[in-house]
Amino acid sequence: MGGEVQLFSFDRLENVFPKVLGALPVTLLIVVTALAIGGLLGLFIAFVRVHHIPVLDQLAVVYISFVRSTPEIVQLFIVYYGVPLIAQALTGVDLSAVEALYFVLIAFGINQSAYLAELFRGGFEAVPAGQYEAGDAVGLTRFQTFRRVIVPQAVQLIIPGLGITIIALFRNTSIAATLGVADMMGKAGLIGAATYHYLEPYVAATVIFLVISIALELLFRQLNKRVVFGRRQTA
């Protein structure tokens, strides 16, 4: 019938797909920045926990427990609304004009730090304790042994878990759209609001998320095989 509303159109999907794909760099920026922040902070936290540094170890346990026990979207809103209030109260600086994307980067970085800290800790503790004694024997400090000897060996052990973490992070970036960030999901929502056709842009975003997630899974699977093979060759 001529007046029938077409709920889904491949022509519309073909039209909106490049527009949604064009927002992929924003999504990847969130992933890369969150991994950079989370990796550095997580490495420090893991070092504190592995060496049981007084006070800091207890604070790290509470921090990790809080972050891993609360939903990411709650953390996102806490950072978005809480950081400006704290900055205003402590320094008098007004952050109301700061783009939401920056708060998203901070929130995801904090979130990843807790997960990466536990991932790193597991890898570090799997390295034989005798490696520290070997470092002491050649005159390395505790930190030098940790950085030059323990970390390179632990990296081989954490690759499988790291792959899962990165894929989950990539998918979870979709919640950034709740703050109006124009990532892929945000762009899909904007297109839907402008055209009153939401299905096609969200299908486009789904396809992109699916393809990249599968590609990342295959990449880390192959990387893990090479690392395992390298360990066997060394052994």
Image: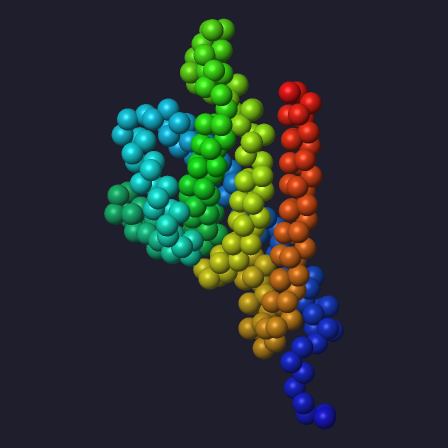
Pinpoint residue 103: horizontal percent, then vertical percent: 43, 50
Residue at 70 percent of width and 73 percent of height: 12
Is 47 on the left or on the right of 31, as rendered? Answer: left
The foreground one among 206 and 194 is: 206
Residue at 69 percent of width and 61 percent of height: 18
Pinpoint residue 177: horizontal percent, then vertical percent: 50, 60
Pinpoint residue 159: horizontal percent, then vertical percent: 58, 36
The foreground one among 194 and 156 is: 156
Residue at 66 percent of width and 51 percent of height: 214
Q: Image quarter for residue 55?
A: top left
Residue 27 visible in rendering: yes
Is 234 on the left or on the right of 152, as rendered? Answer: right
Note whether 149 is above or below 56 in the view shown.
above
Residue 195 visible in rendering: no
Is 84 on the left or on the right of 73, as rendered? Answer: left
Note whether 89 is above or below 186 in the view shown.
above
